[in-house]
Image (cartoon, rainbow, N blue to C red):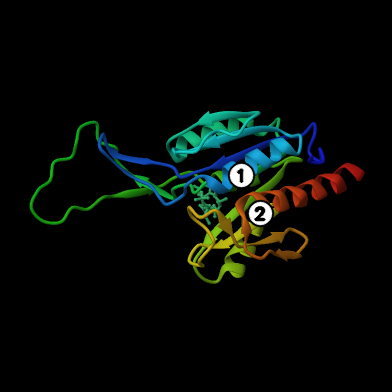
Amino acid sequence: TQPSILSGKKIVVTAGPTREKIDPVRYITNHSSGKMGYAIAEEAARFGAEVVLISGPVSLQVPKGVRFISVESAEDMFNAVMGEYSSTDIVIKTAAVADYRPKIAYDDKVKKKDGAEVLELERTKDILQQLGNEKKDQILIGFAAETNRVEEYARAKLKKKNADMIVANNVKEPGAGFATDTNIVTIYKKDGSSLELPILSKQEVARRILVEAAKILEVATKD
Ligand code: PMT
């Protein structure tokens, strides 16, 4: 049996990739399978939380006892997350959100021509940044998917996004990152401390993250 360390708390988890439309047959996406985010949603429900899972397109089953919101683009995810934010205790942003989208999404299929084609991209909204800017007493947990200088980039994200925790993974490391059943993460916290975890199942990584979040909530409640 699981301890109900998150009972009475509302947790929003984002998971999966986003899809940014080029035309009706093409899109830009990434390798996220949703496994990490779905594991967090499942474990949070086991810990007694009210869980909202906001997910891009993946082929996983929605965990039991979780409210599910299906989204496609970064813009859809932004709207869904912001709609839940004010009533939420903890937000965990596991999703691999596109940083850029095509400037124009064509209504009809773009026909091929001779020679090279250039696709113009524009920035999407940074959801984590917006959450950080609008934060009241929510606990904000971001991820950092890096391939080099992991600690430096993770600590920079922690500060810039006004997050309470950043869960960093080196997606080039075997057994870590996209689509695997395991992950290798270091959790960077706002107080400057960090927690380096060995290779663990995504389920176990999820539990560790949630235990750390529960500790922050506990301290906040005592204040
Ligand atoms: O889904 P899996 O196959 O299990 O893979 C897990 C994972 C590799 C996707 C996961 O462990 C992970 O690292 N997720 C974050 C992926 C990512 O987009 O990282 P980033 O460093 O580019 O973004 C940093 C943070 O900002 C993330 O919390 C992201 O959700 C958020 N973000 C990014 C862009 C954007 N426009 N809005 C955001 O909120």
Question: Which sits earlier in the primary sequence, circle 2 or circle 1?
Answer: 1
- The answer to whether marks 2 and 1 mark residues whose Cβ atoms lie closer than 8 Å is yes
Quarter holding the N terminus?
top right
Say which element carries label 2: helix
Point out residue 76 in the picture as x, y percentages from the top left corner: 47, 34
- Give the labeled residue for mark 2: 205
Q: Amino acid at mark 2?
A: Val
Q: Is residue 207 above or below residue 50?
A: below
Residue reaching furthest to the bottom:
149
Tell me the number on the disc at residue 147. none
Point out residue 92 in the picture as x, y percentages from the top left corner: 64, 45
Left/right of residue 31 with respect to residue 204 in the rendered view: left
- Give the labeled residue for mark 1: 39
Say which element carries label 1: helix
For this rendering, which residue is in front, 204 or 131? Answer: 204
Q: Please give the name of the residue rendered at 86% of the width and 45% of the height, measured from the top-left corner.
A: 218
Q: Amino acid at mark 1?
A: Ala
Tell how many labels.
Answer: 2
Q: Please give the name of the residue rendered at 71% of the width and 49% of the height, measured from the top-left corner.
A: 207
Q: Can the viewer see residue 177 in this picture? A: yes
Q: Is residue 185 above or below residue 42?
A: below
Q: Please give the name of the residue rendered at 48% of the width and 52% of the height, measured from the top-left corner.
A: 179
Q: Is residue 151 above or below residue 217?
A: below
Q: Please give the name of the residue rendered at 73% of the width and 64% of the height, measured from the top-left corner.
A: 195
Residue reaching furthest to the right:
222
